[in-house]
Image (cartoon, rainbow, N blue to C red):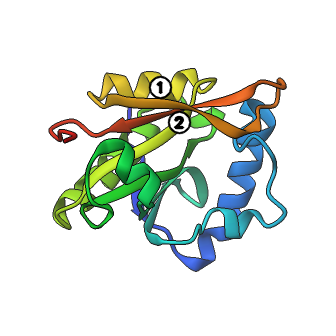
Amino acid sequence: MEEPGIRRRRDDDMKACVEALATVHERDRYPARWPADPGSWLTPDGLLDAWVAMDGTDVLGHVALTRTGHAMATEVGLPPDELASVSRLFATASARRRGVASALLATATAAAAAGGLRLVLEVEDGGGPAVALYEGAGWRLVSSRSGDWTTADGRTALLHTYLAPGTTAR
């Protein structure tokens, strides 16, 4: 099986990224609510970098690194300036079981390590495949809390905070 082509996201990728995200939302309800401006949603405040997995001109997946807020930093017991957050990670249905999400996560992990940053992320409890990906890659559950929004099936979101392997919380 050929590995996906991973590269930094470019401005001209945005239309294809939004189209790929729409397929993920339709199938998996990620994001839980479709954003009014999906391009801005894929470019959150505090964006450090973003990558896409490509097959020709088709976007197979996406991941971003962002600055970590004080609340999440407090949860893991580390200063925000030592952390980066994995954000907006998804793989399209056609890319599943091809290692796309793992390759994107590995790319983000390498970039954070090169910058001397530790990775942290937050995932909603209903994201079983995402939780399996993180736990399978050695990420450690640090905390869980109720979110301030409801999932597509009407539950109050349960958010789990994970810390990348090889790092420890205070």
* Residue 2: x %, y % from top left: 38, 38
Q: Amino acid type of disc 1?
A: Val
For label 2, the residue is: 123
For disc 2, the neighbor class at 10 Å (few under 14, some 14 to 19, many from 20) is: some
Q: Is residue 50 above or below residue 107?
A: below
Q: Name which of mark 2 and mark 1 comes first in the sequence.
A: 2
Percent x, y for residue 19?
Answer: 74, 55
Question: Residue drawn 41% across and 31% down?
Answer: 143
| Coordinates of residue 30 in the picture (x, y in percent) | 70, 40
| Residue 35, position as x, y percentages in the image | 79, 57
Picture layout, residue 50 above or below residue 158: below
For badge 2, the amino acid type reads Val
Residue in the image at 77% along x and 48% along y:
22
Locate residue 76 relative to residue 19 in the image: left or right: left
Please state, as top left, top right, bottom left or bottom right, where the N terminus lies in the image: top left
State the image quarter where residue 170 is shown.
top left
Quadrant in the rendering for residue 32: top right
Please report contact status of discs 2 and 1: CB closer than 8 Å, yes or no.
Answer: yes
Judging from the image, what secondary structure is the residue with disc 1 in?
Answer: helix
Look at mark 1 in the image and give the residue it sits on: 131
